Image (tube, grey):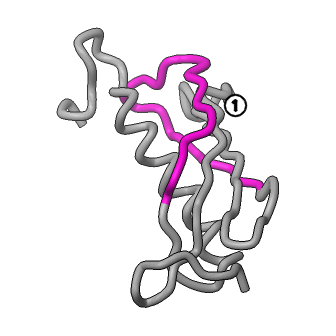
Amino acid sequence: MPTDTNAAGDIFGGWLMSQVDIAGSIDAYQRARGRIVTVAVNEFLFLKPVYVGDLVSFYTQIKSVGTTSIRVKVEAWAERNRGEDECVRVAEAELTYVAIDENRRPRPVA
């Protein structure tokens, strides 16, 4: 959408970051078997721009599990010119999530 674009007309980096966080949190939530919170973006690399009309997909991998924390790697890929099989990696990130209890305090990962 036009509201998701930057001054150059590409997709705003903040939009991409939020989608990466959502993707990573799904994997972390499933592993923790409950509520988690994002505590750190350990690394975030914007590799290529995302254009209006790109179909963006996110792939996650749990990198490590601590007592209360989970580190997740996320890759973002954009399919350009649909139907022509052009797919490029546009970003990669590593985020840390912490499992929390009903009082919003850290809890052991199940």
Which residue is painted at 40% across and 86% down in the image? 103
Left or right, 2 with respect to 67, comes to left
Q: Give the magenta range.
A: 38-61
Secondary structure mostly taken by the magenta-highlighted segment of the chain: strand
- Compared with residue 98, is residue 100 higher up or lower down, i.e. above or below? below
Quadrant into which the C terminus falls: bottom right
Q: Residue at x 62, y 33 (%)?
A: 43
Q: Toward the viewer: 48 or 1?
A: 48
Q: Nearer the viewer, residue 58 or 24?
A: 24
Task: Name the image quarter holding residue 28.
Answer: bottom right
Looking at the image, residue 70 lies above or below residue 12? below
Tell me where residue 72 appears, x and y as whole percent.
69, 53
The residue singled out by tag 1 in the image is: 85
- Circle 1: element type: loop
Q: Amino acid at mark 1?
A: Asp
Q: Quadrant of residue 52?
A: top left
Total count of labels: 1
| Residue found at x 42% / y 23% | 51
Residue with the most extreme right position: 64
Examine the rendered structure and indicate whether residue 24 appears above or below residue 37: above
